[in-house]
Amino acid sequence: MMKGARKLCLWIALCLLVTCALPLAAADEELQVGDYYWGTPAAASNGDAPTLTSLTHNCPNTGKMLPAYFSPTVTTYLLTVASWVSRVQFTPVSGDLYATIYVNGAVVRSGSASSYIKMTDNPQQVTIEVAGSGGRTVYTVFLQRRPSEKRTRVSAGSIDNIYQKSGKWYIDADLGTVTYLDGNVSTYVNKTADHYRYACAENCVFYYGTMSSPQRARNIGEFTANVSIGGLYRFIYIEDEIVAVMPYSPDY
């Protein structure tokens, strides 16, 4: 009789132990579903303000960020992108499983990309906030497009042909390399025959003659009539159009 009672007590104790353990196991499994936990439960963190462990963007090829590498303790950054980039988005990752992340006020799940931020020619400020029971950490990214790489430049070479196509004038030129040594003193080198065709701007300025005695043409017709085919000329561009053509002579 004593043995039977003892077995019954052990069986009841075992059942109670298993019943009490089941909810704990279920809770542990719930926290490990997926890579990140999103929410603000009551037992949220260890009391410290949460931070980001990683912050990336969708412009790895053209985006240049200062400081160059993200650090959880550095909260201010400058990100410049190419002039043609139309939108940017950020992917923040928090080390606190219970933290809530906001990008410009909108909630973003840790490890997920934010909504697109439309780029304009004006600088923008992006705020990324990580909030938890221990406080919050705010990161600021100043976002800016870089100026166009198609800027004003100068080349020199010989004119091979001037022609009109679809109502626009073009110059076919064999361009060489112009090197400026001292101030405006330059030397011209043409190692290979590289031909380039560029459109002339509507208000392009044309000069013919010599560098010491240039003559301004009233229009491209007058310039074409007086141009020296094979002679050296200086070409000034803004973006992809020629805005001025004038005689050129190397200084050396």
Image (tube, rainbow, N blue to C red):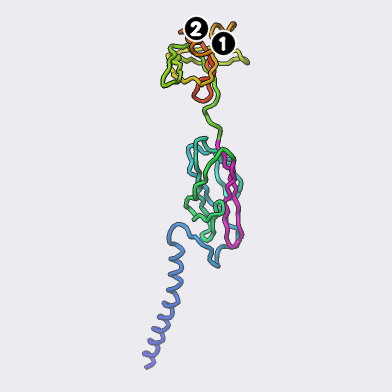
* Element on which disc 1 rests: strand
Q: Callout 1: few (<14), some (14-19), or many (20+) C-alpha neighbours within 10 Å? A: some
In the rendered image of this protein, does residue 47 appear above or below residue 64?
below
Residue 236 visible somewhere in the drawing:
no
Residue 105 visible somewhere in the drawing:
yes
Locate the N terminus by quadrant: bottom left
Question: For residue 64, what is the image quadrant?
Answer: top right
* Element on which disc 2 rests: helix
Name the one closer to the observer, 49 or 82.
Answer: 82
Name the one closer to the observer, 90 or 236.
Answer: 236
Number of numbered labels in the structure image: 2
Q: Residue at x 41, y 21 (%)?
A: 166
Q: Which residues are magenta?
A: 123-145
Q: To which residue does mark 1 refer? A: 216
Is residue 214 shown in magenta?
no
- The amino acid on which the numbered mark 1 sits, given as a three-letter code, is Arg
In the rendered image of this protein, does residue 229 appear above or below residue 148?
above
Q: Residue at x 42, y 73 (%)?
A: 22
C-alpha gap between disc 1 and disc 2: 11 Å
Is residue 142 shown in magenta?
yes
Q: Residue furthest bottom?
A: 1
Residue 22 in the figure: left or right of residue 135: left
Residue 49 in the figure: left or right of residue 27: right
Q: Callout 2: few (<14), some (14-19), or many (20+) C-alpha neighbours within 10 Å? A: some
Locate the C terminus by quadrant: top right
| Rendering coords of residue 113 (x, y %) | 48, 50
| Mark carried by residue 226 | 2
| Rendering coords of residue 19 (x, y %) | 42, 78
| Mark carried by residue 34 | none
